[in-house]
Image: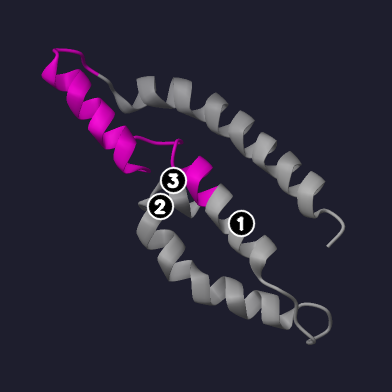
Amino acid sequence: MLSAFIDNIPYVAAMLPVVQSIAALMNDGRGMEPYVFYFGLLTGATLGGNLIPIGASANIAAIGILRKNGETVTTRDFLRIGVPFTLAAVLAGYAYLWLVWGKV
């Protein structure tokens, strides 16, 4: 959810130590490899960035190009497309994570 409001790259960079700490606490303190958590963080941050106009650099660039060509994109217009797409993409990402690493 935070990645919708924070640009993806700084968010992922800031959360890497947190994810590593969570992985170290798993399995009753014995720890586990953090790769599944890294992949989940990357997937969530990337897909969550499509939710609102400022969530990803590509969104800002696209809106800038549209404005340059005389089109107006309001936040409401963006959300009308962004919310269903983000929900579908996050569900697909979750399904992929579960299928690939569900038994870890």
**Vertical position of residue 95 compared to residue 33: above or below:** above
Residue 64 appears in which quarter of the rendering?
top left
Mark 3 vs 2: CB contact within 8 A: no
Q: Which residue is mark 2?
A: 8
Q: How many numbered circles are shown?
A: 3
Mark 2 residue element: helix
Residue drawn at 40 percent across, 52 percent down:
8
Q: Please say whether residue 24 is one of the residues in the magenta stretch.
A: no
Q: Which residues are magenta?
A: 44-72
In the image, residue 71 lies at what x, y percent?
Answer: 20, 13
**Vertical position of residue 77 compared to residue 20: above or below:** above
Mark 2–mark 1 distance (CA, rounded to whole Å)? 14 Å
Circle number at residue 30: none
* Circle nearer the N terminus (3, 1): 3
* Circle nearer the N terminus (2, 1): 2
Residue drawn at 12 percent across, 20 percent down:
68
Left or right of 58? Residue 33 is right
Q: Which residue is mark 3?
A: 4
In the image, residue 14 lies at what x, y percent?
Answer: 42, 69
Circle number at residue 39: 1
Left or right of 16? Residue 97 is right
Left or right of 78? Residue 42 is right
> Which kind of residue does numbered mark 1 sit on?
Phe
Label 3: how many Cα within 10 Å (few below 14, some 14–19, many 20+)? many
> Which kind of residue does numbered mark 2 sit on?
Asn
Front label number (3 vs 1): 1
Mark 1 residue element: helix
Mark 2 vs 1: CB contact within 8 A: no
Q: Quadrant of the C terminus?
A: bottom right
